[in-house]
Amino acid sequence: MANIPVATLRIWEQRYGAVQPATAASGHRLYSLADVQRVLLLRRLTEQGHAIGTIAALDSTQLQEMAGMPAGVAAGANHKFVRPAAGLRMVVVGLPLAARLQRPAVVQHLSQPLRRMAVFESLDEAVQASSGMPADLLLWHAPELLTGVPPALPAAQQSCGARQAAVVYRFAGASATKAFADTGAVVIREPIDDDALGSWLASMEATLRSPQDSSSAREAAPASPALANSAVAPRRFDDATLTAIAGLPPQLFCECPRHVAELLMQLASFEAYSAGCSSVSAADAQVHAYLQQVAGTARALFESALERVARHAGLPLR
């Protein structure tokens, strides 16, 4: 509903009481128009940097005032771009990373609330969009980088009017990261720790808000480590679901769900990376096929582990 992952919506409902839909005799949730409008408002405000825990209890009038909307127009809140008042103006490509950027451990490092002007699923989608106000940063989440910079990256940066492009990845070879850096993009391996991600984002904020050229951001970027097809089960949980699980507060239970979810995202990314890694010989291809098989097998085992942990903790996986 409202382009929100089901796992995220369930967390909003069960933990924060953000919306309370009626339930049919079959157990299915029945969302009214008012429920949908409220969820749209909440989504818009979280995209502007507000933590869901601080706004979930507000009534619709208060939410509309925070969003700068006249009463009664919540149903039209599903547009992509919002006008930022202060803080880093950012366009994010990649829904899991966009969701992660809402976490308190990330945003607490910023001097001003993050202004996410748009969130897209793909670079191609970002290329098709345009904004009247230029962005400071185009942030692309690319779990695995292969050789060659996609033409859609500079095209998306131009379309969004972004001063700087940054690529956050999980797995890549040295030649791939160098190719992206040579285009002027900031290239950083995705930090597992939210505090580290927030610190890096704060450094980008300081650099892009200063009169200096954004090349200093590229120089300050952390060094990037370099780093068949087999009959393995397909992925059962996408990154959006895993990101939602990884973002659950640890005070409710141990941090095992977060660690397992983060491991799953890493394994899935390496599985895809090894499948597309360049091979110069048949022996190379066999090694990469073996690595893909090992990663896929490990991923399937950890998916079963996550299902068991989630069942024990009463966490939604869908």
Image (cartoon, rainbow, N blue to C red):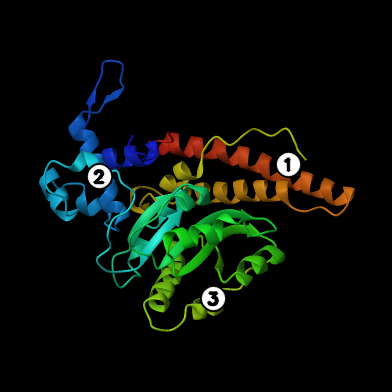
Q: Residue at x 60, y 46 (%)?
A: 268
Element on which disc 2 rests? loop
Q: Residue furthest right?
A: 282
Picture residue at 35% right of the left edge, 70% below the top: 109
- Residue occupied by mark 2: 77
Reading the image, the residue beneath label 3 is 218
Per the image, label 1 sits on a secondary structure element best described as helix
Would residue 75 appear left or right of 262 to someone viewing this image?
left
Between residue 314 and residue 115, name the one nearer to us.
115
Q: Distance of mark 2 from mark 3, alpha carbons?
A: 35 Å
Question: The residue under label 2 is which amino acid type?
Answer: Ala
Q: Could you classify mark 1 by the number of other residues whose Cα lies within 10 Å: few (under 14), some (14-19), or many (20 or more)? A: many
Residues at discs 1 and 3 in contact (Cβ within 8 Å) = no
In screen coordinates, is 128 left or right of 22? Answer: right
Q: Secondary structure at mark 3?
A: helix
Question: Which image quarter: residue 59?
Answer: top left
Quarter occupied by the N terminus: top left
Q: Residue 173 location in percent, x, y? A: 70, 62
Q: Quadrant of the C terminus?
A: top left
Tag 2–tag 3 contact (CB < 8 Å)? no
Residue at the location (34% across, 57% down)?
117
